[in-house]
Image: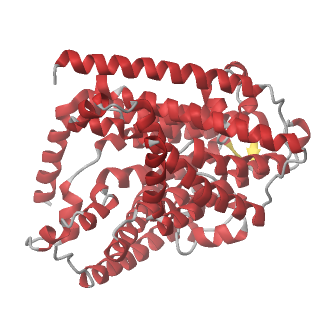
């Protein structure tokens, strides 16, 4: 843990050498992520709700999902860009260190420019909670549960990222898979799952379980259905999924062959 | 013709990644399904006071997801910034070829590839699932081709502008983000621009972003007059001239530095 903090602070300091660039890239990233939500707000101003979910309720889902994926992008940057290690053959150098490759990858770098996205997600969450509060919705348990939901989201996202990275052991390149396993599902998870056709719902509650991180608990917390199980499922699913991803990663490493060139 | 060869080479280079792109297409279709699902959820039962009914909106989103691959998702800065960073730009700018055409013809090759291996397959997926609008009038097809061609020129120019700005700023990540955000938001990727709140909905009609996505899609759906092509043409000409002028400025700046 001590080592981890030391490595992280080193990465932080190296990033801060370019303050202006850091600020601008954070802001523009926050902007690009907020635009979707602003457009949605414009639509819902006009049409009130999407299948029974008003703007603030969708905002909760949206905020949790954006915070989760951006935190993964901050801390899991090397996992996310793992194809570099395959394409450029840098993975060998990780294997010969006395620390496991996964810990090395996690401590190597932080992508702080993504923090802007996290901030934007948090702002949307705050606005939504205030909005719901004004509509006299009981938000006490909602706020209490929020960290669990976000943490489950980050773990699910990290697991998906790790599963996708592992694919690189066979395919080298993974950028195109990520659109399928990360971007599209997390974009979908910004909105309530009940709007999707059955086959999409099936995907988001099984192989790419993004529905569990926000829809499942928020459904119960907003009295839209479900029971106490809805609050237990997110961390449970996240934990199981992380275990599967980790095992697959280890399986991938065992099957890794260096290029030998 | 050297630019034609560059275009072909760029097309063939992209062919190497066919399989990966096909997977990406599935994801792109899912993005489309998500947007369609949101609109269906929003409009169901309420579409009498909306300019688009559920079916029209489905057609709209499906068409947008297809055209995005030829006029939305272009290479960031058309890779001009890489040349600026490693110094290769100084050679590229003094070559006897026209730098603007040199860069844009390579991107054009990629976009032609995208048309066959992204736009068409994604369109087929929508056609087989939610439906894809087929124009009823013969003339629409002619004007659609012109409109798409102009849309591509507008978008290539917007991306070229971002790329050539690297000669002054070296870093273009944020410029690309801003450009891309404006392109999809004001181009009508998720919300047709006539749906935007009051001052924006009028303003965006005259911006180049609408010419890159919204207008060709509306022509395909036969929901707009062909006149908008003139606006597209105007932007295509203005942006091209501006970029040629800017390229000349960049060349001068390079010479002043003396390498």
**Viewed as shown, does residue A14 lie left or right of A46?**
left
Quadrant showing the C terminus of chain B: top left
**Residue A38 visible here:** no
Residue at point 71%, 70% (across, down):
A198
Looking at the image, is B30 positioned above or below residue B223? Answer: below
Residue B6 lies, in percent from the top left, at 43, 47
Residue at point 47%, 42% (across, down):
B1
Residue B175 lies, in percent from the top left, at 41, 30
Residue at point 31%, 75% (across, down):
A169
Residue closer to the observer: A187 or A89? A89
**Residue B72 visible here:** yes
**Viewed as shown, does residue A244 lie left or right of B35?**
left
Q: How are the residues colored?
A: secondary structure
Residue at point 44%, 52% (across, down):
B10
Looking at the image, is A234 positioned above or below residue A74? Answer: below
Residue B9 lies, in percent from the top left, at 43, 53
Looking at the image, is B229 positioned above or below residue B1? Answer: above
Question: How many discs appear?
Answer: 0
Looking at the image, is A83 positioned above or below residue A255? Answer: above
Residue B44 lies, in percent from the top left, at 84, 50
């Amino acid at each position: 843990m001590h080592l981890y903090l030391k490595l992280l602070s080193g990465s932080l300091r190296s990033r801060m050498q370019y303050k202006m660039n850091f600020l601008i890239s954070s802001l523009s990233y926050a902007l690009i992520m907020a635009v979707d939500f602003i457009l949605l707000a414009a639509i819902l101003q006009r049409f009130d709700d999407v299948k029974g979910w008003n703007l603030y309720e969708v905002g909760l889902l949206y905020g949790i999902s954006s915070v989760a994926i951006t935190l993964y992008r901050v801390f899991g940057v090397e996992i996310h860009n793992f194809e570099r290690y395959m394409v450029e053959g840098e993975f060998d150098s990780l294997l010969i260190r006395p620390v496991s490759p996964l810990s090395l990858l996690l401590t190597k770098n932080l992508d702080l420019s993504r923090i802007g996205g996290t901030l934007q997600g948090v702002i949307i969450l705050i606005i939504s909670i205030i909005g719901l509060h004004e509509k006299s919705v009981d938000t006490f348990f909602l706020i209490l549960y929020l960290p669990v939901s976000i943490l489950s989201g980050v773990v699910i996202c990290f697991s998906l990222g790790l599963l996708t990275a592992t694919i690189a052991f066979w395919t080298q390149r993974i950028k195109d898979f990520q659109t399928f396993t990360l971007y599209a599902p997390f974009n979908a998870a910004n909105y309530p799952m009940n709007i999707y056709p059955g086959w999409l719902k099936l995907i988001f509650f099984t192989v790419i379980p993004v529905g569990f991180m926000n829809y499942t608990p928020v459904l119960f917390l907003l009295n839209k259905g479900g029971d106490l199980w809805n609050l237990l499922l997110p961390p449970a699913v996240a934990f199981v999924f992380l275990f599967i991803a980790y095992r697959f990663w280890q399986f991938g490493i065992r099957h890794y062959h260096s290029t030998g060139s | 013709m050297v630019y034609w060869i560059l275009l072909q080479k760029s097309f063939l280079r992209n062919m190497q990644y066919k399989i990966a792109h096909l997977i990406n297409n599935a994801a792109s279709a899912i993005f489309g399904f998500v947007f369609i699902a949101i609109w269906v959820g929003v409009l169901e039962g309420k579409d009498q006071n909306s300019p688009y009914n559920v079916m029209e909106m489905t057609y709209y989103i499906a068409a947008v997801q297809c055209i995005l691959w030829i006029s939305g998702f272009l290479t960031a800065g058309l890779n001009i910034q890489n040349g600026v960073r490693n110094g290769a730009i100084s050679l590229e700018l003094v070559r006897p070829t026209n730098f603007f055409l040199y860069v844009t013809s390579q991107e054009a090759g990629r976009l032609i590839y995208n048309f066959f291996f992204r736009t068409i397959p994604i369109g087929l997926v929508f056609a087989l699932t939610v439906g894809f609008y087929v124009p009823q009038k013969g003339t629409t097809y002619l004007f659609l081709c012109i409109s798409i061609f102009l849309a591509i020129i507008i978008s290539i120019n917007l991306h070229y502008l971002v790329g050539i700005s690297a000669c002054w700023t070296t870093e273009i990540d944020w410029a690309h983000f801003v450009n891309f955000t404006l392109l999809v938001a004001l181009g009508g990727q998720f919300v047709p621009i006539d749906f935007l709140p009051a001052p924006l909905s009028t303003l965006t009609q005259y911006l180049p972003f609408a010419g890159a996505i919204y207008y060709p899609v509306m022509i395909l759906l036969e929901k707009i007059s062909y006149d908008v092509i003139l606006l597209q043409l105007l932007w295509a000409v203005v942006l091209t001239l501006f970029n040629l002028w800017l390229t000349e400025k960049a060349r001068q700046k390079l010479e002043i530095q003396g390498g």
